[in-house]
Amino acid sequence: MIQLSDRLMAMEESATIAMSRKSRELKAQGKDIISLSLGEPDFFTPQFIKDAALEAMNNNFTMYTPVQGYDDLRHAIALKFKRDNGLTYSKDQIVVSTGAKQSIANVVLSIIGPGDDVIIPAPYWVSYLEIVKVAEGNSIVIQAGIEDDFKITGKALEAAITPKTKMIIFSSPCNPTGSVYSKAELREIADVLVKHPNVVVISDEIYEHINFEGKHESLAQFEDIYNQVVTVNGMSKAWAMTGWRLGYIGASKQIADACTKVQGQFTSGPCSITQKASIAALKADPAILNDMIAAFKNRRQLVLDALNQMPGVKTNIPDGAFYVFPDVSSFYGKSFGEWHISNSDDLCMYLLSEALVALVQGDAFGSPECIRISYAASEETLTEAMKRVGAALSKLRA
C-alpha cells in the first residue's frame, strides 16, 4: 500500500463539504433532504456578468493568463478597494487567485513555517486551521462565545500574542457566525497590532457586501497597521459566482510578490474567462445587490423567529453573511430511540436522519456548543426545514 504523507494524514476533510456529500448521497437514495450546509448563494450569476464572459470567449481570451492576473482586472480591483473600502492599493499590490481560499493559502505559505504561531479567533472558517497545518505552523485559538456575538476583544488578542506569533486570521462578516466587527472594534484590534509590527493579519472580507447593519469596515483602513494587513476578497458570495472561482488580495508589495511566486508554482493565473467576467462585476454599482441583500435579511429573520420558538436553542442576531450559529448545547446528553446526543456532530447526524435536514457541526468551526445553519435557500425551503428541525429537537429527552 502507498504510504501517504504525514501532511495529508494530519489534515481534516472540510466538514461543510463532507455534509454536502452525505446530503447528495441520501438524495440519490430518494430521501427528501433539505441541505443548509453549504455557504453558497441560491441566486444565479447576474446576466451582465455572463455576457462579459461570452464576449471574452468571442474575443478569444482563452490563453494562459499572467500569474497575478490580468492588468485590467487588477486595476478594476484597485478601483473597487478605493470606492468601497477607502483602501489604496496599486495593481502591483494585488494578486488574483482561483478563489479566496487559494488567496489565503498563498499568504500563509509565503509567511508561515515550521513552529510559527498563527492566532485564529473561534468560531473560524473550517479551512483556516488546515491551511496552517500544511504550512507546518501552530494554530493558537482564541474562543469567543455567543454572549460576545462571537467577537474577540483587543485584550484577548494581546494576551494571545507571543514572540512566536507571526500571523492572525479572521473574517468580518464572519463565516460561520455572521458577526460583523464595527470600526471601533477593529480600531481596538489595530491598537494591539501597532505594538507588534512583525505580525501579519489576514482580514477575510469575502462577505463584505452581505451586511445588514450599515457600512462594511476594513481593517486596513488604519494607516498605522496598513502594511501588516492582507485584505482578502472575491467574487463568490456577493456576485453569486461560486463556480467561477476567483479571489484576490490587497497587500504590501513584498507580500504580493511572495504570493505571486507561490502561485506561479502551483496553479499560475486564474481562468481567463472568469477574470474578464469579474471586471464587469467589479465595475458595477454595488447597489445592484440590494434586492439580494434584502432577501437574505428577510430569511435571517425567518430562521431566527423559528429558532427562538424552539426550547433549548440559544441565538444571537448575526449582522452579515447568510448564517445563523445557534448554541444547541442544551440538547447534549439527551436521547431519542437509538440516538444519544453527546455533541454537535451527533446532533447534526440525528437531524440529518430524523429531520432530513443537513446542517454543519460547530466542532468544525472551533465551537462545539453550536451548529451552523445556512439560510441561502428560499423562504419556503427554510420554513419547511425549521419545521422539521423543531419537531426532531422536541423528541429529545434527558
Image (tube, rainbow, N blue to C red):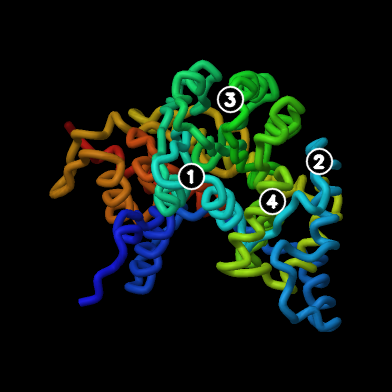
Q: Secondary structure at mark 1?
A: loop
| Foreground label between 3 and 1 | 3
Q: Nearer the viewer, mark 2 or mark 4?
A: 4
Does residue 291 sit above or below 99 in this rendering? above
Residue position marked by numbered label 3 in the rendering: 196
State yes or no: discs 4 and 3 in contact (Cβ < 8 Å): no
Q: First in sequence, mark 1 or 4: give its number.
A: 1
Q: Is residue 125 left or right of residue 245?
A: left
Q: Secondary structure at mark 4?
A: helix
Q: CA distance from mark 2 to mark 4?
A: 21 Å
Disc 3 from disc 1: Cα separation: 24 Å
In depth, the one of 199 and 309 nearer the eye is: 199
Q: Spatial distance from mark 2 to mark 1, Cα to Cα?
A: 24 Å
Whichever of labels 2 and 3 marks the residue nearer the N terminus, that label is 2
Q: Which residue is mark 2?
A: 84
The disc placed on residue 256 is 4
Q: Residue at x 64, y 47 (%)?
A: 206
